[in-house]
Amino acid sequence: MVERAGLRHLLAHAILLMGVCIIGFPLLVAFIASTLSAEQIAGESTLSLSLGSHGLETWKTALFGGQTRYGSTIAPVLPMMITSLISALAIALGKIAISLLSAFAFVYFRFPGRTLCFWLIFITLMLPVEVRILPTYSIVASLGLLDTWTGLTVPLMASATATFLFRQFFMTIPPELVEAARMDGASPMQFFRDVLLPLSRTSIAALFVIQFIYGWNQYLWPLLVTTNESMYPIVTGIRRMIGGGDAANEWNVVMAAALLAMIPPAIVVLTMQRWFVQGLVEREK
Amino acid sequence: MNTSRVVFGNTFLPWLLMLPQLTIIMVFFFWPAGQALIQSVMLEDAFGTSRRFVGLENFHRLLNDPLYLDSFVTTGIFSILVAAGAMIAGLLLALAAQSVMRGRLLYRSLLIWPYAVAPAVAGILWLFLFAPASGILPRPLAALGIDWNHLVDHFDAMVLIVIASVWKQVPYNFLFFLAGIQSIPKSLLEAAAIDGASALRRTLTITLPLLSPTAFFLLVINIVYAFFDTFAIIDATTQGGPGKATDILVYKVYHDGFKALDLGGSAAQSVILMTLVIGLTALQFRLLDRRVHY
């Protein structure tokens, strides 16, 4: 029995290690490529799995932009990261705020039109913006919101998932709490601020991780609504770096930029892993 | 909906609380969705100067368009491959993670990070690995007798987007399967072990059947993912090509609307896609209901 369990553990470790390697492989190659020069990558026979010596130079070009030795101009990634950060924070916090309020209304009030509101929000649950992309774009354009922060972020807050998560969570809060609050003469908003919000901290953290990543990783929407280079988020900006085709791409800079694009959301996921996993798995229940 | 809990007796405040969310979904969701519905029964020229009512002609045209029907088939093949690949890999890793004693959290961290990677970036990473001239993979493939070129070969292009999409989706399935496995009562597995069932047999006869609700749920999620969220992967890698080999439905909506400027056709495609998503959502909720009663 003991021997067989040992063998089983060995097999499990083997499977996991293989998984870790396959999943990590693109990351490793991207990092190596970012330390090579563009010539070394383009020269077919030289790309091997060892670090090059051009790392500092490549990362500097990616972050701050500039001319490469090939003569192409690279747009700086750092301002794009700042755009991404601002819009991801706005989308995440905006969604959390509006969803907290509407979930509060759903659970703690009975008002005419409540069921209608519920269904209106429910329908938006899984319909991604890609599906109705053209009309949404026309509306944002006709409202004069192209190249604005509002146009970049607010349409992406139209989603129901957060509302449902908070509604679910509020319904697990014992009714005695609201009874007690009412007996103490607390107004609805006092109850919301002093009781509900502190209790929702974990849910808010979990949702923040998921929505931050959602916001940071947006691609098609920024591609359409931003035409001004100073408003490109990084994910959209990188895509514009690889227009040249395989041979013309400066893959070393592109890979450095790709790594820069994934470091912030990866840090958020890994440092807030406990809440993230809980929020992800709970959300769907 | 009908919970008997104490409520506040205010009628104005709840509307005020709902207002921000309602405004946003009205302006950025129902208005465009309504526009899509209207446009789908209209014929409009590319500059929007004239438009007239044409009834179901746009739909009729679409459903008789071999390119659109091909796109359905492409989407079907693509989503089945992505869902199957990502679910099998996720399940295998979750089963393995559950059976190790040490390092489970470390493995989890090392396995879930692609969840944070943007689909467009995932596409670019794999595009580089498979780049015919400068990538690292085509050479070993050539040694195996595979002449890789996703810019020309339809099959290679499909393989590329499937791999990139699966890679990005494995963490999600892994986490859900792991949660599913952990919620199986230990007593069941212990009882089976005492009865002399081997580990393999316990997995096959207890763990896997009890995971079927999770698997059904994930199937719907993965199909929705393959249908819609892979847009950026395709745009970053193949852009629907070569030819129309990777032109899935959501990519065609965008392409026909923004590049080909076929507004009516694109709107009709939006309406068809919306119907599909609503159908999938309804299906998912029925499955969830069943899971609750399981």
Image (tube, grey):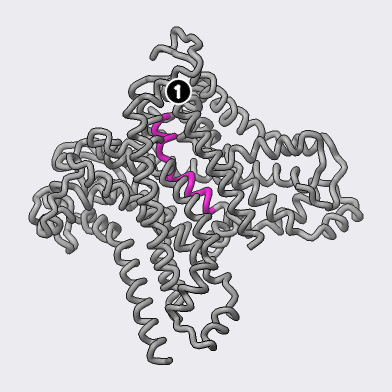
Residue designated by label 1: B59
Instruction: Tell me residue B277's x, y (percent).
Output: 52, 39
* Image-based side of B259 in relation to A136, left or right: left
Q: Amino acid at mark 1?
A: Phe
Height in image: B176 above or below B65?
Answer: below
> Residue B238's image quarter?
top left
* Image-based side of A45 in relation to B174, left or right: left
Q: Residue at x 15, y 53 (%)?
A: B138
- The magenta stretch spans which residues? A209-224
Instruction: Tell me residue B91's x, y (percent).
Output: 43, 65
**Nearer to me, B263 or A213:** B263
Height in image: B153 above or below B66?
Answer: below
**Nearer to me, A84 or B162:** B162
* Image-based side of A122 in relation to A38, left or right: right
Q: Residue at x 34, y 72 (%)?
A: A15
Question: In the displayed image of the protein, which residue is found farthest to the top?
Answer: B50
Height in image: A72 above or below A89?
Answer: above
**Nearer to me, A155 or A83:** A155
SS under mark 1: helix
Position of the N terminus of chain A, as image quadrant, is: bottom left
Q: Badge 1, how many Cα within 10 Å: few under 14, some, many 20+? A: some
Height in image: A15 above or below A250?
Answer: below
Give yes or no for residue A213 being in the magenta stretch.
Answer: yes
Number of numbered markers: 1
Instruction: Tell me residue B77's x, y (percent).
Output: 35, 45
